[in-house]
Image (cartoon, rainbow, N blue to C red):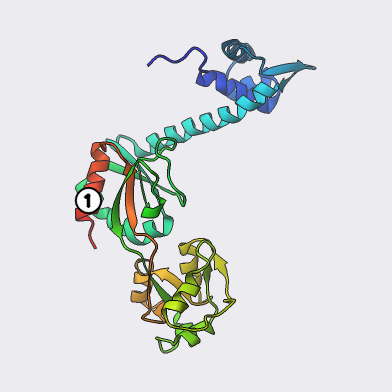
Amino acid sequence: MNRARHTPTVAELSALVACARLGTAAAAAETLGLTPSAVSRSIRGLEDRLGVALFARRRQRLVLSDAGRALVRDAEAILGQIDASARMVMAFGGSGAVLRLAVLPTFAAAWLIPRLADFARIAPEVSLDLTAELGPVDFDAGPFDAAIQRADLARPGTVVTPLAAERLVVVAAPALAGAGVLEPAAVARLPLIQQSTRPRLWADWFAAAGAVPEPAHPRGPRFAQFGMILAAARAGMGAAILPDIFVAEALADGSLARLSQTALPGPSPYALIRPDREPGPALARLAAWLETGAPG
């Protein structure tokens, strides 16, 4: 594919960003390891390519024009992405395939990562690059090949494969749990750790447990993510409502205890979300493993 005539080169963008930051071609040249004349040629070439002045020359300093100011923001982002991509490729060395996955961090830590050794055994040629992503993923605009998130975060034009249901249980550190199972009224007297993104969780749980009336204003700290709530519960900060798959290890090792048999169904299962097109070999291997072979 031929590069469009108006598309800047990396050298031109680098010169633009360096001159904008340092104010002179000489200082930019020192940073870039070039001569001042080479930097000046890059700036002139970019201005000629775009047909606009990117700098005004004032008292031997380069001052961005409005057009230059608009372009330099995007140039910094583009150069940063190129640098990040280069570092990623270097990190993976000679790997045959790299899959970039957006993941919900707590689900990845509790469910996915403990299983990945098995995938590495059956698909050693595939390297996984996991990035925490809490919101919906736009596969057309972003760098990701697929996502492992709640199914309700899927955008149109995607294929959703459920992996694990969410079942919400009430837990606390043993010092708060006492003998174990508590009546709803006893739970209500504890500090109740709340999730800011699901403010109705405790109200829904008390309703399911048959507690009438439920606490009007639960007292307790508030956190945005399940991972922080899990850490707070293990630290004894209060009772928490968490997915059972997130607390299985803590229940097994005794750092948390269940306070009630009442559980809530989650709003959506955790799922593999991928673009609605033929997957490449690496993504197809991962999808098949998740659907049929992921242990546990």
Q: What kind of residue is marked 1?
A: Trp
**Vertical relation: 156 (above or below) 83:** below
Q: Quadrant of residue 52?
A: top right
Q: Which residue is mark 1?
A: 289
**Outermost residue to the front:** 212
**x, y percentage for residue 265?**
36, 68
Q: Is residue 74 left or right of residue 69?
A: left
**Outermost residue to the bottom:** 179
Q: Quadrant of residue 217?
A: bottom right
Q: Quadrant of residue 35?
A: top right
- Name the quadrant of the N terminus: top left
Q: Is residue 43 left or right of residue 251?
A: right
Residue visible at 49% across and 12% down? Answer: 5
**x, y percentage for residue 89?**
38, 34
Q: For numbered disc 1, what is the local secondary structure? A: helix
**x, y percentage for residue 29?**
62, 19
**x, y percentage for residue 119?**
24, 51
Observer-nearest residue: 25 or 164? 164
Observer-nearest residue: 261 or 58? 261
Observer-nearest residue: 108 or 66? 66
How many numbered dots are placed on residues in this image? 1
